[in-house]
Amino acid sequence: MDLTAAAQLARTLMDRHGLTSWTFAYDRARVRAGACHFTDRRITLSRALTAAHDEEQVRETVLHEIAHALVGPRHGHDAVWRRQAVAIGATGQRGYAGGEEPVVPGRWQGRCVAGHVVHRHRRPSRILLCARCRGATTGDRVLRWRLDGQPVPFEQLGPAVRRDLALLRARGTTVVGWGT
């Protein structure tokens, strides 16, 4: 959605639901679509995800955060919050309808032997195993990392990764593609 139109939509909905003293802003989030900042009395949306969403998804996110603002910080996603969300026109659900969340690809991409890919926005600080390859051997589940499409040797991932890899090797685990 166009960011200017999304900001106007957010401000309109916030005013309609009595949040006239609250402010709206964009943030740099890459994983969550919106946030309610009680202390600052501010609702923020992810600039990247808002641009990737359609108007209905943005509306849902704004209403979701407005419901948080209206019920206060002690409710999280409980029944009180859910009732308020539904009352103002949101679904009352956490996350995205249909389960398909838009992904802002991370600069870091981890891939297992089976080809499953995960995205990270920060350098991995530990060895990570593929969650989708539960039946595979541990060595095959270890994610190999690329940064901006270029392979990154495990040595460049830091001391914790080197320690994890040494522990796996000490247990006799062969990590495919990471030496012996």
Image (tube, rainbow, N blue to C red):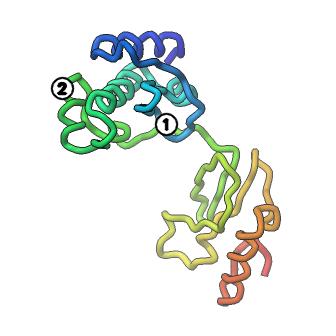
Query: From the viewer's perspective, is residue 179 above or below residue 52?
Result: below
Mark number for residue 102?
1
In the image, taking residue 86 as reference, residue 39 lies left or right, namely right
Q: Amino acid at mark 2?
A: Ala
The number of numbered discs placed on residues in the rendered structure image is: 2
Q: Secondary structure at mark 1?
A: loop
| Residue 139 x/y as whole percent | 63, 77
104 or 174, which lies in front?
104
Spatial distance from mark 2 to mark 1, Cα to Cα? 26 Å
In the image, taking residue 82 as reference, residue 28 lies left or right, namely right
Neighbours of disc 2 within 10 Å: few (<14), some (14-19), many (20+):
few
Residue found at the very far front of the displayed protein: 39
| Residue 9 x/y as whole percent | 40, 13
- When asked about the image quadrant of residue 88, the answer is top left
Query: From the viewer's perspective, is residue 27 above or below residue 30?
Result: above
Residue drawn 44% across the image and 32% down it: 39
Q: Which numbered mark, 2 or 1, is in the foreground of this view?
A: 2
110 or 125, which lies in front?
125
| Residue 18 x/y as whole percent | 29, 15
- When asked about the image quadrant of residue 117, the answer is bottom right
| Residue 173 x/y as whole percent | 66, 84
Residue drawn 63% across the image and 69% down it: 142
Q: Which residue is mark 2?
A: 87
109 or 66, which lies in front?
66
Query: From the viewer's perspective, is residue 171 above or below residue 94?
Result: below
In the image, taking residue 55 as reference, residue 144 lies left or right, namely right
Residue drawn 61% across the image and 59% down it: 115
Neighbours of disc 1 within 10 Å: few (<14), some (14-19), many (20+):
some
